[in-house]
Amino acid sequence: KAGVTQTPRYLIKTRGQQVTLSCSPISGHRSVSWYQQTPGQGLQFLFEYFSETQRNKGNFPGRFSGRQFSNSRSEMNVSTLELGDSALYLCASSFSPSGGLAKNIQYFGAGTRLSVL
Amino acid sequence: AQKITQTQPGMFVQEKEAVTLDCTYDTSDQSYGLFWYKQPSSGEMIFLIYQGSYDEQNATEGRYSLNFQKARKSANLVISASQLGDSAMYFCAMAGNTDKLIFGTGTRLQVFP
């Protein structure tokens, strides 16, 4: 069974640009979550999608958005990039039929490392 | 509010020895899950072990075991027979009613021959 696939693995952008990251979950998984990892802030939750609906959202500005498609694949978009957006962006998927994430293991992809110059 | 605390920024262990990585948590949720992940330098977050708040027995997965002490709100990871490939960052995480993973700051484990 294939794991969570994130593309691209590395990205270099300049301030003011926008970027789209992609995540393909494990087959059969319907929940996709996104996390940002930086040396200063650690791992922070961005948002979670389930059946094409955003079910939960972290404390990030509106420049960060996402969506999920009918095949559970998800994209994350960051507009008007800032230097502070440089980070490792991790996507995770889980089956999550009920009981939420307290009873469902999240499996992560290898991440997309974004550098903003 | 939920919180995970990992007080050991770094740990050293000799190959083949056991090591315990500490994790304490704080939550008012009755139902929650506790997770440990390993992150090598490549960046991928690898799931290791899960413990549900209502599980009476400590979870085990191969060389990994979770020492769950609910009253003390601790969920320490024990790695037995350490291997050089165990060198990595280790994160403790929790999910409760808010349906998102809250991570600790991590512990960097280095295994030496």
Image: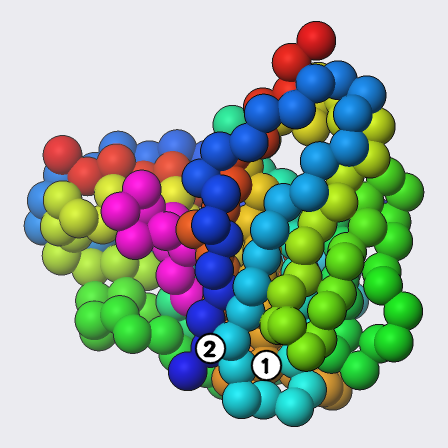
* Chain assignment, label 1: B
Quadrant showing the C terminus of chain A: top left
Kindly identify the amino acid type of the residue bearing the numbered disc 2. Gln
Q: Which callout, 1 or 2, points to the residue nearer the camera?
A: 2
The magenta stretch is A36-45
Q: Main secondary structure of the magenta part?
A: strand
Q: Residue at x 53, y 89 (%)?
A: B28
Residue tagged by mark 2?
A: B2
**Image position, residue B66 (x, y; %):** 77, 56
Q: Is A39 colored magenta in this rendering? A: yes
In the picture, measured across the screen, residue A111 lies left or right of residue A89, that is: right
Q: Residues within 10 Å of mark 2 (few under 14, many from 20)?
A: some
Outermost residue on the top side: it is: B113
User: Residue B57's image quarter?
Assistant: bottom right
Q: Is residue B10 visible?
A: yes
**Image position, residue B91 (x, y; %):** 56, 49
Kindly identify the amino acid type of the residue bearing the numbered disc 1. Gly
Q: Residue at x 75, y 65 (%)?
A: B68
Q: Is residue A95 visible?
A: no
**Image position, residue B54 (x, y; %):** 80, 82
Whether residue A5 is situated above or below residue B103 in the rendered picture: above
Q: Residue at x 75, y 45 (%)?
A: B78
Question: Mark 1 touching mark 2, by CB under 8 A?
Answer: yes
Residue tagged by mark 1?
A: B96
